[in-house]
Image (cartoon, rainbow, N blue to C red):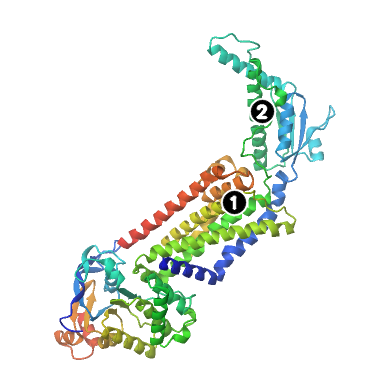
Amino acid sequence: MTLDAPILIEVKNLYKKYRHRTVPAVNGISFHIQKGQILGLLGTNGAGKTTTLSMLCGLVEPDSGEVLYHGKRDMVALLKKLGTVPQDLALYPNLTVAENLRFFGCLHGLSKGDCQQEMDHWLDKFDMSQLRNARIDHLSGGQKRKINLAAALLHKPEFLVLDEPTVGVDIHSRKRILEILQELNASGLTILYTSHYLEEAERLCHSILVMDEGSVVAHGSPEELARQHNVHGSLDDTFFHIIQK
Amino acid sequence: MIAVRAALQKEFLQLLRDRSGLILLFLMPAILVIIMSLLQDKAMKKLNDDGISILVIDEDRDSLGRAFVEQLQQTQMFDVHSDSLAPNTELSAYMAAKGYLAYVHIPPGSTATVRAGAQLLMNKVMGSFGMPASGDSSAPQAKIIDVELDPTLSKAQSMALESGFEKILLNLQGQIMVSSMMKNGERGPSLTMLKLQTGTRKLTIVPNSVQHNVPAWTIFSMFFIIIPLASSMVNERREGSLFRLKTIQHAIRNIMLAKVVVYMVVGVFQMLLLLLIGFLIIPLFGLPAIQTGEHYHLIILTSICIAFASSSLGLLFGTLAKTHQQATVGGAVTVLFLAAIGGVWVPVYMMPDIMQKISLISPLNWGLEAFHDLFLRGTGFSFILNEIGLLLAFGSLVLLLTIKISQYRNTL
């Protein structure tokens, strides 16, 4: 990613307060994601990460503020080019790997042929070709996570949103998933990524956005954040320093 | 189109691999139909198959008495006997000894009483036009008919009998009066030519346990699809699929459409399976085979409408329920409640008046009425239009409500 890369997603004063809560879940946050960037969204539980992701993906209506895609308020265009990897396994356990991928590919409007081609490509990439006819509920945690990711990539998205994609994944599978994400990013895919594994974020993300109680409390590259907060150590140390403040 | 096909394929595959769901949808109603038909056979036989033994003493020996006996026999629900009673016969003991469940006494002069009533009415009408009245203008006081029912009959059975007699009698009274008034004008048919006129909705097949239970439990099972349908939606939400689906354009619409279509197909298959059981299996237990009339296309149409109403209700439950328990318990209780008031367990005609009125609000009752129209009365499209219209309207309203609730939840 270059510093002068165009802005792909711009979030302006996004605000959301759920009716049964006394404090807002997201309190007027603003940030942008450049094309080809990997932005890490970090925060403790209840910091507002999931609500922010939900508003970015059009699942939750913001009370105020806006999400711009290529400078325009065009959620329909954004959704066409959006790939999502939810925290939960967004797959059907009693269907096979191929049936799941074919279903999500076709929902994205891929033809049968294109769907098959993309499916073969991603199964090969994740070393899972031999498991195409295995049911999801017969796979290991790591294998399920890989298919969860593959399902979001079939339609060649421009912007990928990942909500803790490596939860419950063994070290080998996690390493492979991160390698794939780096490869995808190298080919131009823009990624918004949340995780509780801070070393993953440090390794993967160009920029980190730390949220606390619905607000953005820090934003910058891991090195910038460490420098801004005068922390000498890993992202873990910087994160806890920021949150404790 | 690709997306809709993919959604349909996914729903079918999921359903086929859900063994407990399939058991709930097909095996449970199959067993229920057989058991309930056997259980209720004796009770309904008492009212129907054997014909209720009735002792009719016709001392009128005129138009009313003859026509009344004739109409009782035509309904095929009564086994009419006209014994000659000795002067000092103790009626209750005689009825019990002979197994008669009802005693109908048509006293001498009943027809004359009705005719006098007609004359009175005619005089009043003519008087209002300033014309001279003819004949006796005093109101008739005599009873037209006496009915005594066996005390062992249940309240529902007594009510059904009384209501049956009342209908026949009112019909005859009306015809005798009209005929009598026309005769005064020296035209029209004579009283001896009276015939039963019950219209095109008359029963052509005697309702029995099979005729009631097969359609009733078919509709019940068609509404039971609420449970697997709502559960599949809760699963999608719990497993995170809904999150991904919501980010794919039109995916939710396609999935909802696919669910409705798949469960409508399931509903039609349930109906076909249970009718086959009614044709082939139930006779093996010594019960009569179901008779469905000849309007097979209307039976399919009715099934589609019932399945549409039930799948819409399933979508609503799937949208409202947050847990499996809510979906299964809530769905089951609702269907049981609607079935109870809709006449699935106990036929509507056996219910007290108030419950008969309440039954009209149950979509299961609309479906059952439509099947009864087709199976028992052999009627055509125009007679089931009201019921299938109600089912379609109900399904559409519930679907609209589901969409509104989904949209509202996104704004919370």
- Circle 1 crowding by C-alpha within 10 Å: few under 14, some 14–19, many from 20: many
Front residue of this view, candidates B88 and B288: B288
- Is residue B285 shown above or below A209? above
Tag 2 secondary structure: helix
Q: Is residue B365 left or right of residue B5?
A: right
How far apart are the alpha carbons under marks 1 and 2?
Answer: 33 Å
Q: Give the x, y percent position of residue B298.
A: 57, 50
Say which of marks 1 and 2 sits in front: 2
Question: Which residue extends farthest front?
Answer: A113
Tag 1: amino acid: Val
Tag 2: amino acid: Leu
Q: Give the x, y percent position of residue B95.
A: 79, 37
- Circle 2 crowding by C-alpha within 10 Å: few under 14, some 14–19, many from 20: many
Q: Is residue B169 left or right of residue A229?
A: right
Chain hosting mark 1: B
Q: Is residue B294 visible to us here?
A: yes
- Is residue B207 shown above or below B30? above
- Tag 1 and tag 2 share a subunit: yes
Tag 1 secondary structure: loop
Q: Is residue B323 visible to us here?
A: no
Q: Residue at x 27, y 80 (%)?
A: A189
Chain hosting mark 2: B
Task: Identify the residue position indicated by label 2 in the image.
Answer: B172
Q: Residue at x 34, y 61 (%)?
A: B409
The answer to which image quadrant residue B238 occupies is bottom left
First in sequence, mark 1 or 2: give its number. 2
Task: Identify the residue position indicated by label 1 in the image.
Answer: B344
Front residue of this view, candidates A132 and A179: A132
Front residue of this view, candidates B348 and B173: B173
